[in-house]
Image (cartoon, helix red, strand yellow):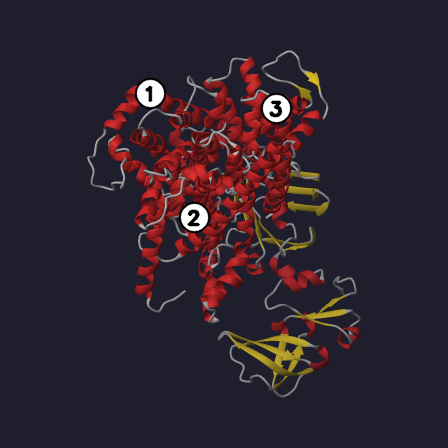
Amino acid sequence: MARRQPMQRRVITTAFAWGIGFAIFFPILWTILTSFKTELEAFSTPPKFLFFDWTTENYGIVNERSDYFRFAMNSVILALGSTVIALLFAIPAAWAMAFAPAKRTKDLLLWMLSTKMMPPVGALIPIYIIFRNTNLLDSRAGLVGVLFLLNLPIVVWMLYTYFKEIPGEILEAARMDGASLWKELVFVLAPMAIPGIASTLLLNVILAWNEAFWTLNLTTSDAAPLTVFIASYSSPEGLFWAKLSAASTMAIAPILILGWFAQRQLVRGLTFGAVK
Amino acid sequence: MATRQTGIVGRLAVAPSVLALFLWMIVPLGMTIWFSLLRYNLLDPGNESFAGLMNYRYFLTDPAFLSALAKTLQLVGAVLVITVGGGVLLALLLDQPIFGRGFVRIMVIAPFFVMPTVSALVWKNMLMHPVSGFFAWMMKSVGLQPIDWFADAPLTAIIVMVAWQWLPFATLILLTAIQSLDEEQKEAAEMDGTPALSYFYHIVLPHLARPITVVILIETIFLLNVFAEIQVTTGGGAATTNLPFLVYAQALQQYDIGGASAGGIVAVILANIVAFFLVRMIGKNLEA
Amino acid sequence: MGTIALKNVQKKFGDVDVIPGVDLAINNGEFVVFVGPSGCGKSTLLRLIAGLEDTTGGEIVIDGVDVANVPPARRGLSMVFQSYALYPHMSVRNNIAFGLKMAGQPKEIIDQKVAKAAATLNLTDYLERKPRALSGGQRQRVAIGRAIVREPKAFLFDEPLSNLDAALRVQMRIEIMQLHSALGATMIYVTHDQVEAMTMADRIVVLNKGRIEQVGTPLELYNRPDTLFVAGFIGSPRMNFLQGDVARVLGAQTVGVRPEHLALSTTSGQWPGKILLAEHLGSDTFLHVDGGALGRITARAPGEFPQGPGSPVWMTPDSSRLHRFDSEGRALRG
């Protein structure tokens, strides 16, 4: 808006913005830094910023002592598994809703979204009891099932919005060109929908990875993902900040990186189209 | 010909998802309602009996419930104020021409992608620890007495950490909305000589009214269910128990299935009120 | 062969009766243009012929076969869409080849046909490019190439030139007409632009609110419009319509005379008027004249007309070119 004094204003705004950005990012930065300190240095006051004895011992300890890898694998299996299954269900559903809409389609979509709004505590008790009685507690299969159902509305919704952006005329051209329904889907729709499917996969893997209600309540050790592992640091023995930092950094690093790519999808997926 | 065919295929394609979600909705909810009408304790299995609305009466008159409700509303309200207010300001800031805007964006967005348990423990230990925490050090260096967050103001502590996690969400959405403001409108206002504050008040703010409402509604849905942060930091306690945690505690700590189920239904009703408005808003947008 | 017959074809969308009933016979090799204002049903009619929509009633017969249950691909038709509808993830070559691939033709034949189509349309250099790297005109040609290569019985064009700029539109118009001469295939062309209709068509079908107002050659429609609507739609600038005494004297409710059929004079004539506005195009001059009781009249003068706004002018209609219409808007003949 101001074209006068562009440089001065820009510099001030930039300094301000960087300051605030840094302040917001600080907890994460601090965690990463602390992960490279010894426990003694981590707990000492005044806190050291950059000039301390950098060490990677914490990463080693966390890995050996608590079999970090197993928890990480569980996170991957749960996040990826539930999202892929959701995609298998959602791709045909979203296709139908986008390209063969019926009178009820809109209502159906809204209903699906509304299932995401149910408070988990409303389902906690029955699910817990059912899982207990069918040996699904602390099982990867059980949790993949729950996360799948949790994810499904958003996956359907996001795919629906992506499919709607594909011009219908291109599919009609394929029909005129003699493509059967199946060929139309495989040769024309799918290639055009790949970016949308990838974005949906990305966001939902992130959401599933960070899920911290069902994972905390339905797993203990076998199927426990990183969310549970980190939670075990809430009642530790002795000094543990550096180790907590190392474990945390490892737990959040992949998602932070993926999250950067998933920004736009975040807006699309979680505002349910109410913001363009 | 093709149009007739797709109708049937279409219905088959949607069926599995609809069925899955239908079961997911009906079965647990139905069971919770059923349990809420029983006297059912996991420590005393096999002795369930029908109790009618007794569980509801006990639950709703339990002072713990009112406290939990209050904490829930406080948590949701405070986080909404911080995130929406902060979000608008941040969005405006990020809309400015700054050097390294992309980098600032990364820093502001990052907290949303941190898992709640990590966030909670990092805040509780390394930042808010009354002796060795970072905040303690900051306050001491300016001559103030450090706050013992989890002893004196645990709910505030939780509000701070939850707000930190949700600020990026609000910022991103409001930033998207601000950037969708027609460039030509900006230029027209400039030609008209509109001062910045006036421009903000008369043009930007009304444009943001809708996205802000969306952010409020969606955040509310998720904030009503804050759980992990509480479990991992305070493990409950009167000062920080919200409605979901109360239900959880009654179910999996006191094993009072009947009572907890009643509580669960209350939480569902509360959420439904908000959901009603949100679904209506989304529905209106689907027409567009 | 590419004869198409429409017998009482109807189309309803829900409760809305978009096409109440259309009868039409299209001969093999004809270039037929469906023209009319927005919402008149011309695109809908085209899509019914293509098979992209189902009819609610009536028959569509292609070469003697009722195609109601025949899917679009097997009707032997090709369509060129307004937005070109090219497959964005495929090269030009694969776009053109797609239909042949779907038909299961062997690779050598496909390559041959694609090369031929590309040569005809000057696309040989672009065969490996993707649509996003092409200009609007090039994309249009790819869309046409995709249609040609299937050697259809008839081509369907849905407002193909609307997305192009004016100069390109003129050029593409000529190319499409040359294509028609070269291939001799039946072509059905939808447009809202009556200039395209007049220049390209063997016969024009004028549609209004889902009904056919008139079918005829361009000159037939120009010289003998059957209805007020057709008279006002064909010809630019629009025909002048006069009511009142002028019409009553000739036994009609409305009388129409085209701007180009008014002889202009600065001294004398049948209808006096005052020039409001003069549009100088160099080749013609269009005068907008206040004809007093006759209302606003548009007149065309060949070349330059010396007078300007405010000057008096006299207009004399060519009596052999006066059109008379009754109170229903139908032409009165004889």
CA separation, marks 1 and 2?
A: 61 Å
Task: In this rendered view, identify the residue nearer to me: C8 or C221.
Answer: C8
| Nearer mark to the viewer, of 1 and 3 | 1
Mark 2: secondary structure: helix
Find residue B38 and report its horizontal and vertical position in percent. 68, 20
Classify mark 2: residues with Cα within 10 Å, few (<14), some (14-19) or many (20+): many
Find residue B134 and report its horizontal and vertical position in percent. 33, 41
Q: Residue at x 39, y 53 (%)?
A: B94
Q: Identify residue for label 1.
A: A66
Mark 1: secondary structure: helix
Q: Residue at x 41, y 47 (%)?
A: C121
CA separation, marks 1 and 3?
A: 35 Å
Which numbered dot is residue B28? 3
Mark 3: secondary structure: helix
Task: In this rendered view, identify the residue nearer to me: B193 or C54.
Answer: B193
| Quarter of the view holding residue A199 | top left
| Nearer mark to the viewer, of 3 and 2 | 3
The subunit letter for the residue under badge 3 reads B
Amino acid carrying mark 3 in the image: Pro
Find residue A251 and report its horizontal and vertical position in percent. 35, 30
Which numbered dot is residue C139? 2
Q: In the rendered view, would you say A46 is above or below A84?
A: below
Q: Is residue C107 visible?
A: yes
